Amino acid sequence: TYQKPDSGADGAWVERHALVRGGAGWRTVPEAELLAFEAVDSMSGVEPMERIATAAEAAALRARHPGRAFLAFPEDRSRSIRMLDDLPERWIATGADGPITGEAERGEFYAFQVGVWALAALDSVDLAFSALRGPRGAVIPASALSSFSTRGVDWQGRPFRRRLQVAPGKVQALWAGVLVPTGATAGDYAGTVTVRAAGVPPLALPVRLVVLP
């Protein structure tokens, strides 16, 4: 449902300058320059995850990683990965294989994403997790982390695994999360999330999760 076009111009001014539909008065007024399009509200916005990188930018990024089967791009849960055929422009600026960072409260299920850009055909893509180690020997076990793009429990309570394949040139979002224990010690936790695919070297991404008090 789209809002009908509206104008805040004074009606008498519009009539006086023949700016009505079919009129030619627009030829006499100063020419305006379009500066930007803006979403009417946050729900209608597509930035930054649907602002597309140019083909040249994507090619330059690929050239910086010769011989790789895939590149990985961690993303916060607030910026859902939406495009499957193009890279977001922000990934050109942030670069590939960066750390996963975030803040979570005790007792929160903290979700995050890893975007995988396939430079070759990928089969059996999955995530593996280490424990997250925090202050004064505190540990969030690896079992508290989940890859719900590739495995989980279905609506009937049955465990399942999904064989995930990604074609060359495509982008795949891998959603994951960590259930922070209610009694977790507040502070910085560190670990790794490893992206795996059959027949290619795995890629370990560092994780830094700040558990708030």
Image (cartoon, grey):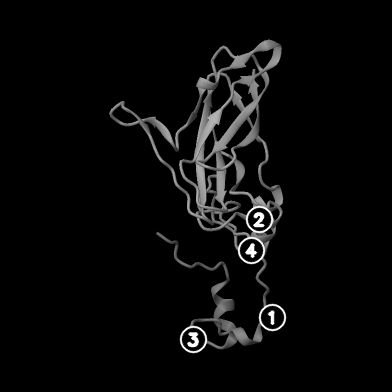
Is disc 2 surrounded by few (<14), some (14 to 19) or many (20+) residues within 10 Å? some
Mark 4, residue position: 54
Element assignment for label 2: helix
Q: Separation of disc 2 and disc 3 at Cα?
A: 51 Å
- Residue lying at 55% horizontally and 46% vertically, measured from the top left: 116
Element assignment for label 3: loop
Q: Separation of disc 4 and disc 3 at Cα?
A: 39 Å
Residue type for callout 4: Thr
Q: Separation of disc 1 and disc 2 at Cα?
A: 46 Å
Mark 1, residue position: 30
- Residue 207's x, y, as percent? 64, 30
Residue type for callout 1: Pro
Q: Nearer the viewer, residue 150 or 10?
A: 150
Residue type for callout 2: Arg
Tags 4 and 3 touching, CB below 8 Å: no
Residue type for callout 3: Gly
Is disc 1 surrounded by few (<14), some (14 to 19) or many (20+) residues within 10 Å? few
- Residue 118's x, y, as percent? 55, 51
Mark 2, residue position: 62
Tags 4 and 2 touching, CB below 8 Å: no
**In the rendered structure, which disc, 4 or 2, sits on the residue that comes first in sequence?**
4
**Tag nearer the camera, 1 or 2:** 2
Is disc 3 surrounded by few (<14), some (14 to 19) or many (20+) residues within 10 Å? few
Whether 48 is drawn above or below 23: the answer is above
- Quadrant where the image shows the N terminus: bottom left
Q: Which mark is residue 22?
A: 3
**In the rendered structure, which disc, 1 or 2, sits on the residue that comes first in sequence?**
1
Q: Nearer the viewer, residue 15 or 175?
A: 175
Q: Separation of disc 4 and disc 2 at Cα?
A: 12 Å
